[in-house]
DNA sequence: GCCGTATGTCAACGCTTGTTGGCAACGGTA
DNA sequence: TACCGTTGCCAACAAGCGTTGACATACGGC
């Protein structure tokens, strides 16, 4: 044994003097990962944005992988679909995802990183499995079809986000929000509740 | 002016001794771009795969960007939708895209690269605008709605490819082909021909 | 006030990257 | 045979990367 770990007398979840720095790093990291993807979001650039030394990133997050793991935690905050009229579930979901994508860059980061980085892809799988699946299962007519229907919903949602926020395919990027909802809502609704393909 | 370009007496499209090498480079490049994305697909790795020296890549394609431009030319080979029963257009399109994605890695390369690289994103926009839009316009009921409907179709197609071939979201990656067609076909059909959102 | 720890900076490491220029072998043409 | 453009390999370059360890400073409990 080399030496004892001694986390000094720090109460659980106690505030550290370095909390502001940690938060700055995390914020800068999320921005960079969202804008550039995993490889081009360098630790040096993130540190520059956060106005600290690159070595601090290593101290607080261990490695670039560790930093991404911390920066990519995410809660979809999905609404309980049993509280909206059953026929509105599709539209409600589309609206909710548009909101989340627009006000939290972590989703774009996950999309950009997940495409070339294994850890990012795993995180994306987790999020959709652990957060979307249960919500879908509650409105799904046939028990056991939850995973399939969740995958279908995510395919349409992810495709929309890809075209609108990442690839910026012209009409998709500029389409008014409610027009998008009107087109995609029924699709998602069908994936959620239609009896048969 | 520095010096004259002198392409020596080579008839148009004449065969060069280096054609095999050029093809090997292009093949290796497509594989690497598809598997790794732009940044992680290094010129050195591509050269190793093609069993030549990295400097040959530079000679024949000028730069990494030039190599990608050459490796990412792509023809969707879309069928003429006016030759299938109008009610089958959606399913036909989904089947066709599944085929193209499975037997040509360039599409996966475009997806992986387009997400983090501006040139890749531009290529993707081009392909869908120049190749998908005209085909959609022919079956579109309202003239002028072609671009919008093409964007909607591509959102569902790209989302499917992302989940199935890149992120490998479990149920989407393993779903039998015809089950996918049965689910997505009607969606695409609606985007193509439905009168109103 | 003292002391141990937490916070932060600096300089350097080993490695990989895209890219360049020089040089040897080849092959068709005159 | 002599020539010259083509094809290919090699060694090197500057720049950037993630990561490390030594060192200065500030803080907070005693």
Image (spheres, coloured by chain):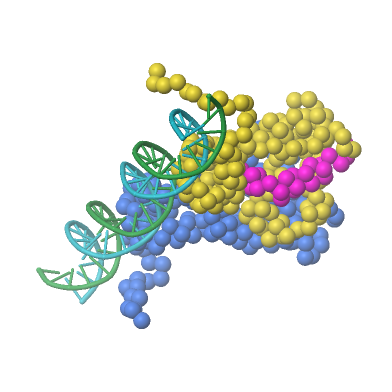
Chain colours: A yellow, B blue, C cyan, D green
Q: Position of residue B114 (x, y in %)?
A: 56, 53
**B100 left or right of C12?**
right
Q: Nearer the viewer, residue B189 or B120?
A: B120
Q: Position of residue B63 (x, y in %)?
A: 41, 60
Q: Residue at x 75, y 25 (%)?
A: A144
Q: In the rendered image of this protein, does residue B110 appear above or below residue B130?
A: above
Res. B74 visible in picture: no
Q: Nearer the viewer, residue B188 or A127?
A: A127
Q: In the rendered image of this protein, does residue A178 appear above or below residue A145?
A: below
Q: Position of residue B25 (x, y in %)?
A: 39, 53
Q: Residue at x 50, y 48 (%)?
A: A52
Residue, far bottom: B1
Residue, far top: A1
Q: Nearer the viewer, residue A70 or B172?
A: A70
Count every numbered label the image shows and give the total.
0
Q: Quadrant of the N terminus of chain B?
A: bottom left
Magenta stretch: includes residue A90: yes
**A161 left or right of A26?**
right
Res. B3 visible in picture: yes
Which region is colored magenta?
A86-114
Q: Residue at x 68, y 49 (%)?
A: A161
Q: Nearer the viewer, residue B44 or B190?
A: B44
Magenta stretch: includes residue A26: no
Q: Residue at x 82, y 53 (%)?
A: A178
């Amino acid at each position: 044994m080399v030496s004892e770990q001694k986390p000094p007398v720090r109460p659980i979840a106690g505030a550290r003097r370095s909390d502001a720095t940690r938060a700055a790093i995390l914020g800068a990291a999320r921005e960079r990962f969202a804008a550039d993807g995993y490889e081009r979001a360098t630790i040096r650039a993130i540190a520059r944005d956060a106005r600290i030394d690159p070595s601090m990133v290593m101290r607080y997050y261990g490695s670039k992988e560790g930093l991404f793991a911390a920066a990519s935690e995410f809660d979809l905050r999905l609404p309980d679909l049993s509280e909206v009229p059953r026929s509105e579930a599709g539209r409600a979901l589309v609206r909710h995802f548009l909101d989340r994508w627009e006000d939290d860059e972590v989703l774009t980061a996950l999309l950009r990183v997940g495409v070339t980085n294994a850890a990012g892809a795993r995180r994306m799988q987790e999020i959709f499995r652990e957060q979307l699946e249960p919500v879908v299962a509650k409105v799904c007519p046939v028990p056991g079809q939850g995973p399939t229907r969740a995958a279908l919903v995510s395919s349409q949602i992810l495709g929309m986000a890809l075209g609108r926020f990442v690839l910026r395919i012209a009409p998709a990027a500029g389409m008014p929000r409610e027009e998008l909802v009107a087109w995609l809502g029924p699709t998602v609704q069908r994936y959620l509740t239609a009896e048969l393909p």
